[in-house]
Image (cartoon, rainbow, N blue to C red):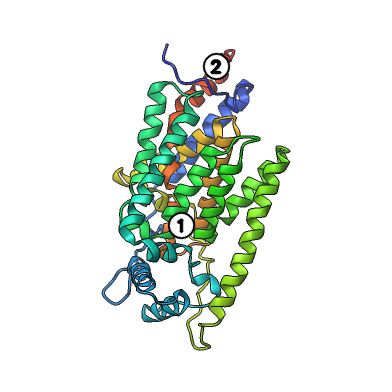
Amino acid sequence: MVDLGSFPTRFDRFGRGAAIATLLALAVAILVAIAPTPDAPKPKVRASEAEQSDLQLYRDITARVAAGEAYYPVAADELRKGSYPLKPFVTFRAPTHATAYGLVGETVMVVLEGLLALAVLVVWWIRLIPVLPLRGRAAALILMVGGTATLIEPVTGLFHESWAALLMALMIGLRRPGHAAAAIIAGGLALMVRETVLPMILVMLGLATIERCWREAAGWAAVLGIFAVYLTWHAGMVATVVRPDDLASPGWQSFLGPRFALSAFSAVSSATVLPKALAFAAIILSIFGWASVRTGWAARVALMMLGYGAMLALFARPDTFYWALLIAPLSLAGLAFVPRAIAVLVRAARGMAQQPA
C-alpha cells in the first residue's frame, strides 16, 4: 500500500454525503477556474519604451541611495520621472528595502536572499518530517524550490514582495505553539519591508488569540504597534517631499476577479511553465491540499493563499499582479497533501471506515 502520509485531515469524520459534496465542490471549482474566458484580464508588466518599469524604478532608487542621497527626495524624484503617482503616501515603498540595498549593495543582497530561501526550504523540510513520507517531502520540497527560484533571481529580488514572501514562508514554518519568537521576528521583518504583509500578521494574531496562545498574541500585537509607529513616521516623511501637483493613485478597486488572481499566481510561480488550464487547476488543488491538513501551520498557509487571492481579485490592477509573489514559495507545495486528502474523501464517499492517521 502506498504511503500517502500520516497527517490528520479535516475530512476524517466526514459521512458519505459530506464527502461526496466536497469532491463535487472541488471538481466544480476546478472546472470553473479552467473554463476559457476570452476577456479575462491578464497581468501587465509596466516596461514599454514610454514607461519606466517598476524594476528599473527600484534599481534607480537603490543606486542613488547607495551613492549617499536621502531616500525620500530620491523616491519622489524617480516616481515623478516615471509618471508614477505620489499620493497617497502608500505609493512610496517603506525605506527598509532600498536602505538595505544601498548599505550593502545588490550583490550581497542577492546572496542573503539565496540564504534566506535555503533557510525556508530547511525549515519546511523539518516541519514536514512528521506528516509526509520521504517521497512526499521530496515532492513538496521540489515544489517549494520552484516557488522560491523565481524570487531569488537578481532582478526579481528588487521587488519588495520577494523578500516579504520568503520571510512570511519562514514565519509560518518556524511558528510553533509556545515557541513563536522566531516566527514573530520573521513576520515583523516582512511587515517592515512591505506593508501588504499586514493582513497576514492580523491572521497570525487572530489565530494565536483563538488558540489561547496569549504570549504569542502579545508578540504579534507588539509587532503591529511598532509597525504603526514606523508607518506614521513614513507618512510624515512622504508629506515633506510631495507637491500639490503630483499625480494621485487611481485606486485599488479594479475588481478583476478570481481568474486574474489565478493568472497572477501562475505567472509568478513554477506553474507558469504549464498550460493555463493545468496551472489554474494546480493552484486550486494546492489550496485544497493546504486546507485539508488539520494543523495550525497548514491552516495559516491556506488562509494566506485565499487572502492574497482575494486581494488580487478585488483590489489589484493588471500592473500590480506582483502582489502574487507574496505566496510564491508555498503556492504549489500543497499538492503534496492532495493524494491523502482525496483518498480520505473517496473512502468516506464509498462508506468505508477511515484509517487512523
Relative to the observer, which residue lies in front, 272 or 173?
A: 173
Dot 2 and dot 1 residues touching (CB under 8 Å): no
The residue mark sitting in front, 2 or 1, is 1
Which label sits on residue 136?
none
130 w.r.t. 123: above or below: above
Q: CA distance from mark 2 to mark 1?
A: 41 Å
3 w.r.t. 214: above or below: above
Which label sits on residue 350?
2
Which label sits on residue 323?
1
77 w.r.t. 120: above or below: below
Residue at point 34% right, 62% down? Answer: 105
Q: Can you give x and y, in whole percent of width and height, for residue 176 in the image? A: 60, 35
Q: Secondary structure at mark 2?
A: loop
Q: Quadrant of residue 213?
A: top right
Residue 54, visible in the rendered structure? yes
The amino acid on which the numbered mark 2 sits, given as a three-letter code, is Arg
The quarter in which the N terminus is drawn is top left
Residue lying farthest to the left in this orientation: 49
Q: Can you give x and y, in whole percent of width and height, for residue 221 in the image? A: 68, 52
Q: Secondary structure at mark 1?
A: helix
Q: Can you give x and y, in whole percent of width and height, for residue 120 in the image? A: 44, 40
Residue 260, visible in the rendered structure? no
Q: Can you give x and y, in whole percent of width and height, for residue 57 in the image? A: 36, 71
**Local crowd at mark 2 within 10 Å, few (<14), some, or many (≥20)?**
few
Residue at point 37% right, 50% down? Answer: 112
241 w.r.t. 36: above or below: below
Locate residue 352 relative to residue 331 in the image: left or right: right
**Local crowd at mark 1 within 10 Å, few (<14), some, or many (≥20)?**
many
Relative to the observer, which residue lies in front, 291 or 183?
A: 183
The amino acid on which the numbered mark 1 sits, given as a three-letter code, is Trp
- Mark toward the start of the polypeptide (2 vs 1): 1
The quarter in which the C terminus is drawn is top right
